[in-house]
Amino acid sequence: MLQHPEDHNFPLPVDADYKATKFRPLTAAPPHMRAFHLAWLNLFSCFFSTFSIPPLLPLIRHDLNLSAVDIGHAGSVSFAASVLSRLLMGPTCDLVGPRIASATLSLVTAPIVLATSLISTPQAFIATRFLLGFSLANFVSTQFWMTSMFSLVTVAAANAVAAGWANAGTGVTQLLMPLIHSLFISLFNVSSSTAWRLTFIVPALFQTLTGVLVLVFGQDTPLGKHAKTTSCGERKSVLKVVLGGLGNYRGWVLGMVYGMSFGVELTVDNVIAGVFL
């Protein structure tokens, strides 16, 4: 039986595909705006966790005897991981939907955030930063999710605001991590070396919480679960799209522009704290 948008009682006006034609970020109306808030908050926690190390780097560097080369390598592998993981997140969203993909990545990488408190060698530090970089692939799942929820007339605004609000996690962690470190010293009367290790409990718990919220309260599309692509023909068509994109010079131009903007931003985020400390 053919369904029409009017057959469903959505708080926001929708088009024929049940995608919202209005974007109201100050509401949490399900399912569209609830998905928006879950998506950006989950990505916010990933940015917060991934860049929670640089603000405490002077302390970590001293305790682990990190050289400038070690710190440089750690920043490089973190950046590389964020690039590699994005290549995998797109097909993953196609396969299982943005909700499962996003929540799983957050929940899998959250223990790595916590493991930062246990590192004792430069090699472990570099490995931890590499693994944490994978969580930034949730940027892809966020954009995918917004595209599933909002129509062409509103998806640009939804994507822009979700990405912008989530990206603020990078700045917030620069402010909060040193404060949390100082708070632990005051509350528990521990040394600075112990306090910075305890501090990573906070981003780990935060990221775990947002991952659980996405899993419990989110839905992939306005009508519910993501429809998996199962036929061989459909899988081939996806491959054709990917190959077509790689062969389109416009995609490479956009990629270079993105690399010179967001890529530079990630690089700066890794070193900016050291400039002011």
Image (cartoon, helix red, strand yellow):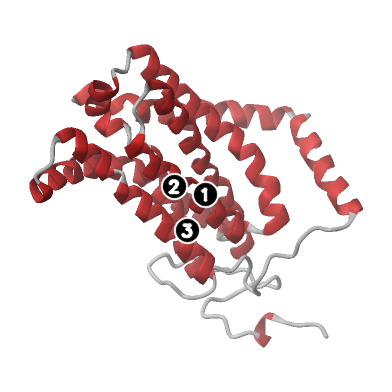
Residue 157 vertical placement versus 125 (above, below): below
Q: Which residue is mark 1?
A: 108
In which quadrant will I find the C terminus? top left
Q: Please, is residue 214 above or below residue 184 in the view?
A: below
Does 259 sit above or below residue 172? above
Secondary structure category for the residue under label 2: helix
Q: Position of residue 272 (x, y in %)?
A: 29, 26
Label 3 close to label 2 by CB (< 8 Å): no
Residues packed near mark 1 inside 10 Å, few (<14), some (14 to 19) or many (20 plus): some
The answer to whether marks 2 and 1 mark residues whose Cβ atoms lie closer than 8 Å is: yes
Q: CA distance from mark 2 to mark 1?
A: 7 Å
Q: Position of residue 22 (x, y in %)?
A: 52, 68
Nearest to the observer: residue 132 or residue 169:
132
Mark sitting earlier along the chain (3/2): 2
Nearer the observer: mark 3 or 2; the answer is: 2
Name the residue tied to disc 3: 211
- Frontmost residue, 114 versus 84: 114
Q: Amino acid at mark 1?
A: Val
Mark carried by residue 111: 2
